[in-house]
Image (cartoon, rainbow, N blue to C red):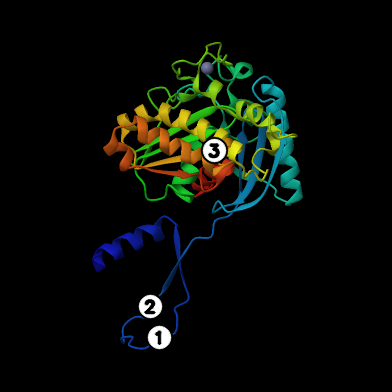
Amino acid sequence: MSPSGVTFLVRRLLREGRVVEVDPLAKGKGSGSGRPALRLLPTPLSGWVAGIDFGHKHISVALADGSGAEIGSAMTLLNVDINAQEAMNAACELLDRLCKKYEVGDLVTIVAGIPGPVDAQRGVVRSPTVLSGWVGLDPAAELQRRLGHSVRVENDAVLGAIGEHRRGVASGHDDVLYVKISDGIGAALILGGRIYKGSAGLAGEIGHNRLENNAELCRCGSRGCLEAVVSVDSVVAQLAHSHEGVTIDRIDSLPFADEITDRIFSDAGRTVGQALSSLCNLLNPSLLVVGGTLGTANPALLTGIRLGIDQYAQPATAQGMTVAAAEHGSRAELVGALYLAARATF
Ligand SMILES: [Zn+2]
């Protein structure tokens, strides 16, 4: 940049309070005889922020400082889909306990993610088929009433995509497809470097795309939906035939390394890859990030997704796209929530 361009920008940053001038360093070797140099440092951010991640069957909360660096988190298991009020009470209690543990007083910003479509204009949950107990609710208003603080609510996959784009494996990519595979399957799109949410904020609900030749009953009342065929439940049911004691809450901590497990995950991956191939043809992303509990439970899932895409997407599209596991795994949504919350304080 030209010296005048740098001067202009530094003046602006100083005016906006984003940087401060601090003591000049001692003149170094080769310094001229002019005005002593000043050091510029980013303005220290004050206050604490929080993120809440509602899954279909769990709630996680985390606290971070003003830069978004996490200081602690907590998690509880609960059927979130059906018990909306109970889930929001539990999230607020969990957050309250975490604040007490870390002696955090007032929170500056709170961002929450929910596993379903949120109407961008009205802020209410729109889908009776995905989050049956939440329809018509305004989660931001409900959480605000309980916490006494304004809360921003986003779709969870959107937060996961932001977490991976700003702080993870998708950094530097402008066109990214993020897919969260857990108890349900949701996606978020980053196109041209920006999150794309669609006309009403409902883009990315790929879990209920129909798969041909499948008749599994889905929670939405339809049959053969992608997330009815591939989910934590379905994989656990398959694993249970050969692995005693496999449970949903332990699926990402069991040291699976056998042929049957790899086949089950690889087969699930191929199904997802086939379903995503048309999206890849349509959008031509440079990176597909796979997150969620199941998405990062076994590398064979990723191998299967790669195979499915290579087989069904256009060759040039498939070859130009990397498939990668979410760097933050099933915590990507929390990372994204904390990033957004910290950015809002700044
Ligand atoms: Zn469905």
Q: State if disc 3 and disc 1 touch (CB < 8 Å).
A: no
Question: Is label 3 in a helix, a strand or a loop?
Answer: helix
Q: State if disc 1 and disc 2 touch (CB < 8 Å).
A: yes
Residue 261 lies, in percent from the top left, at 60, 37
Residue 274 lies, in percent from the top left, at 41, 28
Above or below, 203 against 219 in this view is below
Q: Quadrant of the N terminus?
A: bottom left
- C-alpha span from label 3 to label 2: 50 Å
Q: Which mark is residue 27?
A: 1
Question: Is label 2 in a helix, a strand or a loop?
Answer: loop
Does the Cβ of the disc 2 residue fall within 8 Å of ligand 1?
A: no
* Residue at 65%, 40% in the rendered image: 61
Q: Which amino acid, mark 1?
A: Lys
Residue 91 lies, in percent from the top left, at 69, 34
Does the Cβ of the disc 3 residue fall within 8 Å of ligand 1?
A: no
Residue matched to label 3: 295
Q: Which mark is residue 258?
A: none
Q: Quadrant of residue 230?
A: top right
Q: Quadrant of residue 277?
A: top left
Q: State if disc 2 and disc 3 touch (CB < 8 Å).
A: no
Residue 279 lies, in percent from the top left, at 36, 29
Residue matched to label 2: 37
Other residues around mark 2 within 10 Å, as few (<14) / some (14–19) / many (≥20)? some
Q: Which amino acid, mark 2?
A: Ala
* Residue at 72%, 36% in the rendered image: 76
Q: Which amino acid, mark 3?
A: Gly
Please, which residue is most extreme toward the front here? 259
Question: Is label 1 in a helix, a strand or a loop?
Answer: loop
Residue 315 in sight here: yes
The answer to whether 95 appears left or right of 297 in the picture is right
